[in-house]
Image (tube, rainbow, N blue to C red):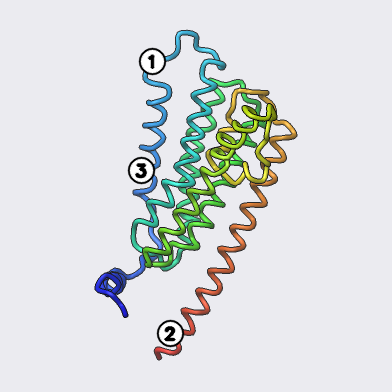
Amino acid sequence: MPTEADSSLQVAELADPPRSLFVPRGLVVLSAMWIFIAWVTLFGFSPPVQAQSSSYGPSIQLLFATIGVGVAIAWPMLRLAGRASSVPLAQSIFDGLAILVLLQVVLWPLRLVTAWSLSRTIALDAMLALTIISAGALLSLASASSRPRTRTFAMIVLVVIALGPPLFRATVGLAAQTFFNTDLDTPFALWAASAPAALAEFAAPRPLDTTMEDAILVRHAAVHAAVAVSLACVTAIIRGAHDSKSTRSAE
């Protein structure tokens, strides 16, 4: 039998209809604050004693890892904590474009304090775009639902995807090296699925030009993005057909 809590949830869903497409001004402001706070925390307001590209390397890597956390976790959490969307895929596209444009202001000026080549910067930009596409496509699968359980489960899945590969390397990889004296590399396909891990890998202070490993990582990220977009498109088509059928039944 339905409990009082279930009845309250149903009433809340009826009283809070899905939201139509809107301009994500709040998301842009919060994203800018996220980047600003990360920048101030990692770099501070004073330049290093020796202002060389090597001095900024570790901080830049942590900055992009923080951006990855924002893309893969903070953005979906913001949307899944709010009202459901009547056009989840379109809203995710709108959100993703806003975030990607904002991140261009962060990425390209960093060439002034790093020795990144043009190809490396373009590769990092491509990885940013692919992680945003993957996160947005997966977010659209759940943002149309008003059910708390669905949204909670989707958020758990997104957190596991984002933090699973780094935790795997930190625990299993460390245990293999400690007890078996063996370096256990995280598979590229698994590493590319995690936005914080993939972005931190590209921003790491290592060879300044793109390598074969970088190309493989981008290729796996592109496959993940294609799969996520395919799932989102199929879900949107099925949802649209279901809504049309419900409308005809109501008439």
SS under mark 1: loop
SS under mark 2: helix
The residue nearer to you, when weighing 182 against 18, is 182
**Residue 156, how many percent across, how many down?**
46, 53
Q: Say above or below: 76 vs 21.
A: above
- Left or right: where does residue 58 sit relative to residue 115? left
Can you tell which quarter of the image residue 122 is in?
top right
* Residue located at (59% from left, 27% from top): 204
Near mark 1 (Cα within 10 A), the count class, few <14, some 14-19 or many ≥20, is few
Near mark 2 (Cα within 10 A), the count class, few <14, some 14-19 or many ≥20, is few
Q: Dot 3 corresponds to which residue?
A: 30
Three-letter residue code for mark 2: Thr
**Residue 96, how many percent across, how many down?**
49, 50
Three-letter residue code for mark 1: Ser
Q: Seen from this angle, which residue lies furthest right?
A: 212
**Residue 135, how many percent across, how many down?**
52, 51
The image quadrant where one finds the C terminus is: bottom left
Residue 202 can be seen, yes or no: no
| Distance Cα–Cα, label 1 vs label 3 | 24 Å
Q: Earlier in the sequence, mark 1 or mark 3?
A: 3
The residue nearer to you, when weighing 158 against 89, is 158
In this rendering, the count of numbered labels is 3
* Residue located at (47% from left, 38% from top): 67
| Distance Cα–Cα, label 2 vs label 3 | 37 Å
* Residue located at (39% from left, 38% from top): 32
| Distance Cα–Cα, label 1 vs label 2 | 61 Å
* Disc assigned to residue 247: 2
Q: Dot 1 corresponds to which residue?
A: 46
The residue nearer to you, when weighing 7 against 195, is 7
